[in-house]
Image (cartoon, rainbow, N blue to C red):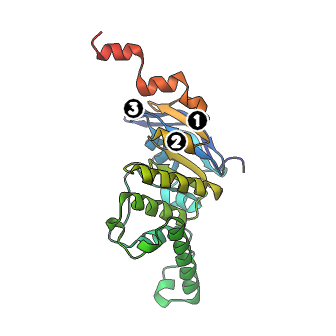
């Protein structure tokens, strides 16, 4: 499999306004692919198209060669495309362990009646899923919080719970929407190391992130978008020094002159 995800000439409009403009992106297994750009550039809209929240007006999105364009979100998740959100979405009153096991339902083979009559299959499947939860809690350093309500933990730990829940569904593509948002410096360093370990599992990872130091350290390849359109694409060193990227983030001298009334 050459690519785990292929976004080909995708466009998305809202009330006639262009949110995504003819984007093409291809993510390989085991690759960390960064999507960066100024606020309002269309980054989250792109992720919403990939995960089925939005359907693009033009173009195709393929996961492992299968066309998933416009497919329902739960069906895309079942196939192995999982995401986290910029604003953490956890069951705050439920324990850490309960939050993580919620992610296993996409892979469970149980029928509704198995949990009522507790068949041998049910018991075997439950044991398997809880073992997976224990392994993920250990991986993320969350074991000591297993019975703690998720909402009682720090923002950094809540980020880890959300990522653990996504990994519980055994994805082959993990989509991270600003994973370092709201984290302090130490939490960001810890998260960076965790993402590198996840990469070693062979997963493809797509990431939106505003922390440029983190982006340049983590990513193998980057696409920069502005007003929904690609303005640069390449390895971190190339993108970091691309004049078009610098202009999009900082502005031109002419724009600064206008702001200063010149």
Q: Residue at x 53, y 59 (%)?
A: 77
Q: Which residue does the numbered mark 3 point to in the structure image?
A: 16
Return the x and y of residue 244 as percentages of the image width and height: 51, 23
Quarter-of-image position of residue 216 = top right
Which element carries disc 2, helix, strand or loop? helix
Label 1–label 2 contact, CB within 8 A: yes
Does the CB distance between marks 3 and 2 fall below 8 Å?
no
Q: Earlier in the sequence, mark 3 or mark 1?
A: 3
CA neighbours of label 2 inside 10 A, class few (<14), some (14 to 19), many (20+)? many
Position in image of residue 69 (x %, y %): 55, 47
Disc on res. 215:
2
Instruction: Please name whichever residue, 197 or 47, is drawn nearer the observer in this view of the structure.
Output: 197
Q: Residue 236: give its label.
A: 1
Q: Residues within 10 Å of mark 1 (few under 14, many from 20)?
A: many
| Front in this rendered view, residue 215 or 43 | 215
The residue located at (48%, 65%) in the rendering is 165
Label 3 environment density (alpha carbons within 10 Å; few <14, some 14–19, many ≥20): few
- Residue lying at 64% horizontally and 56% vertically, measured from the top left: 200
């Amino acid at each position: 499999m050459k690519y785990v995800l292929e976004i080909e000439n995708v466009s998305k409009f809202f009330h006639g306004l262009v949110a995504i403009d003819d984007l093409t992106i291809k993510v390989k297994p085991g690759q960390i692919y960064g999507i960066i750009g100024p606020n309002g550039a269309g980054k989250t809209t792109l992720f919403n198209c990939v995960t089925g929240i939005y359907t693009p007006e033009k173009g195709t999105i393929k996961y492992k060669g299968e066309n998933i364009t416009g497919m329902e979100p739960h069906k895309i998740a079942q196939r192995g495309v999982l995401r986290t959100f910029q604003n953490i979405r956890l069951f705050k009153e439920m324990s850490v362990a309960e939050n993580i096991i919620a992610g296993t339902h996409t892979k469970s083979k149980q029928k509704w009646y198995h949990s009522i009559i507790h068949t041998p299959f049910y018991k075997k499947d439950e044991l398997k899923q809880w073992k997976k939860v224990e392994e993920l809690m250990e991986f993320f350093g969350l074991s000591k919080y297993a019975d703690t309500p998720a909402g009682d933990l720090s923002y950094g730990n809540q980020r880890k719970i959300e990522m653990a829940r996504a990994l519980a569904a055994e994805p082959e593509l993990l989509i991270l929407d600003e994973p370092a948002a709201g984290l302090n410096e130490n939490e960001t360093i810890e998260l960076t190391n965790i993402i590198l370990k996840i990469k070693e599992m062979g997963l493809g990872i797509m990431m939106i992130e505003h922390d440029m130091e983190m982006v340049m350290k983590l990513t193998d390849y980057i696409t920069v978008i502005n007003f929904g359109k690609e303005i640069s694409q390449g390895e971190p060193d190339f993108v970091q020094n691309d004049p078009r990227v610098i202009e999009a983030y900082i502005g031109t001298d002419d724009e600064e002159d206008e702001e200063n009334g010149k």
